[in-house]
Image: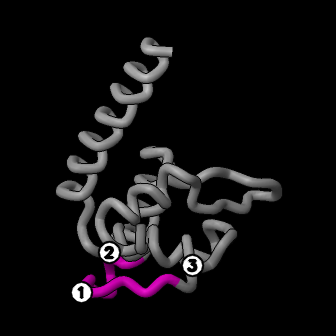
């Protein structure tokens, strides 16, 4: 039991450090994209690319930036793939949104 508590504490600390890093590393558009996806529930990448509105990006870079944001959220394991190419914010992504104050704890 003591070992289990120590392991859980270590995992929690590691996630907090990761979230601190991501909070600094992610630009506002990435954070708001994660919140937008969370509010949508489930969606396909196609929907994200066509519906999410980026702020302060020149028109010629929108598609590139949206693809980068999507890939980053998937690679950082903040989104989970569901059936038929649908994705949703997972529990880690939800904890991150709470960590940065975009969702209530």
Quadrant where the C terminus is found in the figure: bottom left
Label 2: how many residues lie within 10 Å, few (<14), some (14-19) or many (20+)?
A: some
Residue at 43% over, 87% down: 53
Label 1: how many residues lie within 10 Å, few (<14), some (14-19) or many (20+)?
A: few
User: Can you tell which of label 3 and label 1 is closer to the viewer?
Assistant: 3
Observer-nearest of 28 and 61: 28
Rendering quarter of residue 100? bottom left
Instruction: Tell me if residue 5 comes above or below residue 38 in the rendering.
Output: above
Residue 15, percent from left and from top: 35, 39
Residue at 34% over, 25% down: 10
What residue span does the magenta drawing correspond to?
52-62
Q: Tell me the residue that label 1 is attached to.
A: 56
Q: Are the residues flagged by discs 2 and 1 in contact, CB closer than 8 Å?
A: yes
Numbered circle sitting on residue 75: none
Residue 74, percent from left and from top: 51, 51
User: Can you tell which of label 2 and label 1 is closer to the viewer?
Assistant: 2
Q: Tell me the residue that label 3 is attached to.
A: 39
Task: Pick out the residue farthest to the front.
Answer: 1
Q: Tell me the residue that label 2 is attached to.
A: 29
Residue at 31% over, 71% down: 101
* SS category of the residue bearing label 3: helix
**N-terminal of the two: label 2 or label 1?**
2
Label 3: how many residues lie within 10 Å, few (<14), some (14-19) or many (20+)?
A: few
**N-terminal of the two: label 3 or label 1?**
3
Whether residue 11 sits left or right of residue 1 in the image: it is left
Instruction: Tell me if residue 27 comes above or below residue 50 in the rendering.
Output: above
* SS category of the residue bearing label 1: loop
Instruction: Tell me if residue 51 comes above or below residue 86 in the rendering.
Output: below
């Amino acid at each position: 039991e003591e070992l289990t508590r120590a392991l859980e504490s270590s995992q929690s600390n590691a996630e907090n450090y990761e979230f601190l890093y991501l909070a600094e590393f992610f630009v506002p558009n990435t954070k708001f994209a994660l919140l937008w996806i969370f509010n949508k529930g489930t969606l396909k990448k196609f929907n994200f690319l066509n519906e999410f509105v980026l702020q302060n990006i020149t028109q010629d870079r929108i598609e590139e930036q949206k693809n980068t944001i999507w890939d980053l959220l998937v690679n950082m394991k903040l989104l989970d793939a569901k059936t038929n190419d649908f994705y949703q914010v997972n529990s880690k992504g939800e904890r991150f949104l709470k960590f940065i104050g975009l969702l209530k704890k």
